[in-house]
Image (tube, rainbow, N blue to C red):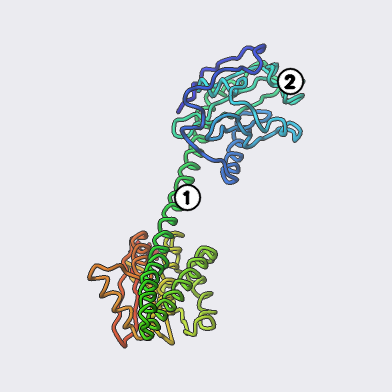
Amino acid sequence: MSGVNRKSTPIHPDKGCLKAAPAPDAPGGACGIVASEALHALLERGLKAIVALAGARGGVIRLVPPSGGTMRLVCAVGLPPDILASEDLVDSDCGMCGAALRTDDVQVQSGSYACARRMGVFATGPGTGPMLAVPLHCRGSTIGVFNLFFGDSARLPSDIMGLLGPVTEMLDLVLDNALLEQERLLSSLSAERQMFAGEIHDSLAQGLAFMRMRMSLLQDAIRAGNGAQSLKYFRDIQESLGEAHAGLRQLITHFRQPMDRQGLVHALENTARTFRDRTGVALRIENRARDLRLPAEQEAQVYQIVREALANVIKHAGASNARVLLDRTAKSLRVSVEDDGSGARIARRRASAGNGTDEHYGLEIMRERARRIGGRLRIVSAPGKGTQVCLSIPQSPEPRTEP
């Protein structure tokens, strides 16, 4: 069992709140876990089970914040409301809890322990027995304690030390998993920020660079009195400015409106309902993949790929109609966005990208999103034949139902 010694270590009742220099490796500092409502709920359920199994009068769990210092009460079972207020914050070097943090060992003390005076009648009055402070860990670092308070008894229950091992490992596992989830969310946020930076680079930064070059040429043409060239450069700047504005609105919409919680198909259908009124292009969603269920990360990335493809339909295709088709084979999910536009401009962009120039209008962004979920993106476009953006994602075979 990590970090918990079943041998109890009594604290002298006259010591009060022990004051000692913090350990070099401050509790909680190596782990960096941040308590959340979900973590509180999990720990509370675990504490209720522990209190019931141990036959204790009550219990609390305290965690030290990543920066160290004062322990904060995370959850409590069996404590009166008036006690909870005074127990919310406790110094991390205080009494048996501080000793459990410093020594990484179980601490046992009778109900007459001086620092229990904050808890009033609950800890010091009639019917009060021994108290326990047991260290908690996250990835090997001691980051908190849980206390158990027992009823009128001179001794702890005979089987309590055998129980502490499994229950402490359970709480440590909850903390490890909470940190893993926290890291996963931070990693996802970091990846999304990188994606956001890529979208800004590909949509706004390049457009601004183009306009800056055209402004220089416009200035030269004005100085030379060349009206035709001046008008041409002005129109180039005006068109690029409109595209940059549309790209910015697209980014704002993306980050303000996450995908519908009812799933990918429902979110796409909601998009289609207002698509024609907003864009002049009729959009149809055709779902041939019945009972489609994807992991949340895949649904989010597929949705954004479709949105980017539809944005290209609006900006470049000159289309009247578009279709999003979802289909499934034995080995993959296929999502395609098709339009009846000219296809010429996208084809030219793809040809330029093949010669080493940067892909504008989000094509590379779509490919990066596809790679993040293990998929492949293929774009078919030819002058006069429209454009088709095809996404293929490998899928595990569905389990067969035995007759």
- Viewer-side residue, 130 vs 223: 223
Q: Residue at x 24, y 67 (%)?
A: 356
Give the label, 1 or 2, closer to the camera. 1
User: Disc 2 marks which amino acid?
Assistant: Thr
- Marking on residue 124: 2
Q: Which residue is mark 1?
A: 185
Please identify the residue farthest to the left as the structure is shown.
Answer: 355
Residue 270 is situated, as x and y percent measured from the top left of the image, at: 53, 74
| Residue at mark 1 to residue at mark 2: CA–CA distance | 44 Å
Residue 324, quarter of picture: bottom left
The answer to which quarter of the image holds residue 193 is: bottom left
Q: Residue at x 72, y 24 (%)?
A: 118
Percent coordinates x, y for residue 48 in the rendering: 62, 37
Residue 282 location in percent, x, y? 47, 85
**What residue sits 56% from the left and 35% below the top?**
65
Circle 1/circle 2 CB separation < 8 Å: no
Nearest the camera: 40 or 184? Answer: 184
Total count of labels: 2
Residue 37 in picture, x, y percent from top left: 60, 45
Type of amino acid under label 1: Leu
Disc 2 crowd, CA 10 A, few/some/many (<14, 14-19, 20+): some
Mark 1: secondary structure:
helix
Which residue is at the front of the view, 258 or 280? 280
Q: Is residue 235 above or below residue 29?
A: below
Residue 201 located left or right of residue 355: right
Decide: is 269 above or below 77. Answer: below
Quarter the N terminus occupies: top left
Instruction: Give 47 or 261, whichever is nearer the viewer.
Output: 261
